[in-house]
Image (tube, rainbow, N blue to C red):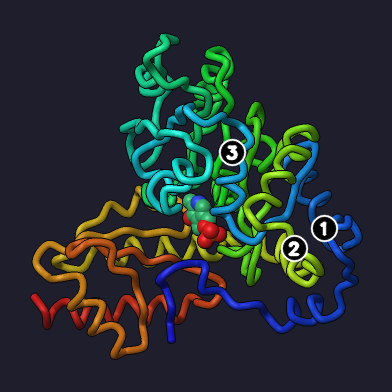
């Protein structure tokens, strides 16, 4: 199988499994797990934040962040493609009693002026705008990397307006590698960030929420409330720690493979995409005449898996399990299947 549906399909490598098997563990709810503590410290250090807390998923780290930053009745602002808005089962409303107002940006990113228009004037009829969320890279935007200056102007403006700002950095690692900028540099000024170990980094499970010491202390209470405090989770933390140490730099290979794939796909008749918009490991391409489900079905017969997003839109994500040779096979197969389907 060549599985390009997502970078979440990555499986732990033999070396990672060895580290997991040998991890020192304890009851983390009692504060006894040295592997979890080590991961939290290492993560905070890389992100340039005071503290971090380990959780089972990126949905949970995001939702705990929303809960910690807000009060019921507040409103958060996010770009229309935001995962926190569209892919977390309505969590902000259900778990935090918070409404969501959408910013219409471009490829998942927005400008300070787009944000300014959406902040409510303080008046007793309206919800209070208290939180801004940005996603970097933006998944549905096409794995886009926020230009640093644009990000800074949004951060500074949010603080001027007395809003907290959270980054959904599920793929912050990709943004850092692609822009040759450290995670800590990208995060300057952010009040909190959520990062995933279970995507391109290849750990089986886990995410972290990072922020100030006080913010993380409060968020630990909500992690408990949401059911995410775990016991001998050092087994999982060890895998995440290994991924941080060994799989971060290699994301550049996923990005190179995505370039090969994007420029190749752009040449195939009936496929529409601008390869110059592909900045990291995610590629969306449109089909002009062919139904996306039909193409996906044909590809599956050749053991190639892709994600159908809409009837004319497909997503592919390069990842740890797929090498350059396989990318070339994918290109050849899509080319021959397209020529038959058109
Ligand atoms: C995957 C992802 C998450 C978290 O997802 P989980 O599957 O809950 O770990 C959050 N934000 C973005 C942008 C993602 O792609």
Relative depth, front residue between 226 and 186 = 226
Location of residue 102 in the rendering, given as x and y in whole percent from the top left corner: 35, 33
Q: Could you tell which of marks 3 and 2 lies nearer the N-terminus?
A: 3
Residue occupying image coordinates x 47% and y 20%: 128
Quarter of the figure with the N terminus: bottom left
Residue occupying image coordinates x 71% and y 37%: 211
Relative depth, front residue between 181 and 9 = 9
Quarter of the figure with the C terminus: bottom left
Please say whether residue 249 is visible from this viewpoint. Answer: no
Q: Could you tell which of marks 2 and 1 lies nearer the N-terminus?
A: 1
Callouts 1 and 3 close, C-beta under 8 Å: no
Q: Reply above or below: 46 against 115.
A: below
Question: Crowdedness of circle 1 by 10 Å Cα count: few (<14), some, many (20+)?
Answer: some
Residue corresponding to mark 2:
230
Q: Secondary structure at mark 1?
A: helix
Question: Crowdedness of circle 3 by 10 Å Cα count: few (<14), some, many (20+)?
Answer: many
Q: Secondary structure at mark 3?
A: helix
Please say whether residue 127 is visible from this viewpoint. Answer: yes
Relative depth, front residue between 243 and 256 = 243
Callouts 2 and 1 close, C-beta under 8 Å: yes
- Between the residue at mark 1 and the residue at mark 3, the CA separation in whole angstroms equals 20 Å
**Does label 2 point to a residue whose CB lies under 8 Å from ligand 1?**
no
Residue corresponding to mark 3:
67
Callouts 3 and 2 close, C-beta under 8 Å: no
Relative depth, front residue between 301 and 195 = 195
Residue occupying image coordinates x 43% and y 30%: 77
Residue 29: mark: 1
Location of residue 262 in the rendering, given as x and y in whole percent from the top left corner: 34, 62
């Amino acid at each position: 199988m060549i599985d390009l549906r997502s970078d979440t399909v990555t499986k732990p490598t033999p070396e990672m499994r060895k580290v997991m098997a040998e991890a020192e563990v304890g009851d983390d709810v009692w504060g006894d797990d040295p592997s979890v503590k080590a991961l939290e410290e290492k993560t905070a250090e890389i992100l340039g934040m005071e503290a971090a807390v380990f959780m089972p998923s990126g949905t949970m780290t995001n939702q705990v962040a929303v809960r910690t930053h807000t009060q019921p009745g507040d409103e958060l602002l996010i770009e229309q493609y935001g995962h926190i808005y569209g892919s977390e089962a309505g969590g902000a409303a259900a778990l935090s009693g918070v409404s969501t107002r959408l910013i219409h940006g471009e490829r998942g990113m927005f400008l300070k002026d787009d944000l300014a228009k959406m902040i409510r004037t303080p008046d007793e009829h309206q919800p209070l705008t208290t939180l801004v969320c940005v996603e970097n890279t933006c998944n549905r935007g096409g794995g886009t990397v926020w230009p640093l200056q644009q990000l800074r102007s949004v951060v500074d403006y949010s603080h001027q307006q007395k809003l907290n700002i959270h980054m959904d950095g599920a793929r912050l690692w990709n943004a850092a590698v692609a822009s040759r900028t450290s995670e800590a540099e990208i995060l300057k000024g952010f009040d909190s960030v959520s990062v995933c170990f279970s995507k391109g980094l290849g750990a089986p499970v886990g995410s972290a929420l990072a922020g100030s010491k006080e913010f993380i202390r409060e968020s630990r209470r909500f992690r408990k409330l949401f059911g995410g405090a775990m016991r001998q989770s050092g087994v999982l933390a060890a895998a995440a720690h290994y991924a941080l140490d060994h799989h971060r730099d290699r994301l550049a290979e996923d990005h190179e493979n995505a370039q090969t794939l994007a420029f190749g796909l752009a040449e195939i008749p009936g496929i529409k995409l601008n390869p110059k918009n592909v900045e990291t490991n995610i590629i969306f391409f449109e089909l002009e005449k062919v139904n996306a489900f039909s193409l996906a079905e044909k590809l599956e017969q050749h053991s190639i898996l892709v994600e159908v997003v809409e009837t004319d839109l497909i997503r592919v994500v390069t990842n740890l399990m797929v090498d350059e040779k396989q990318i070339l096979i994918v290109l050849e197969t899509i080319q021959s299947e397209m020529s038959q389907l058109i």
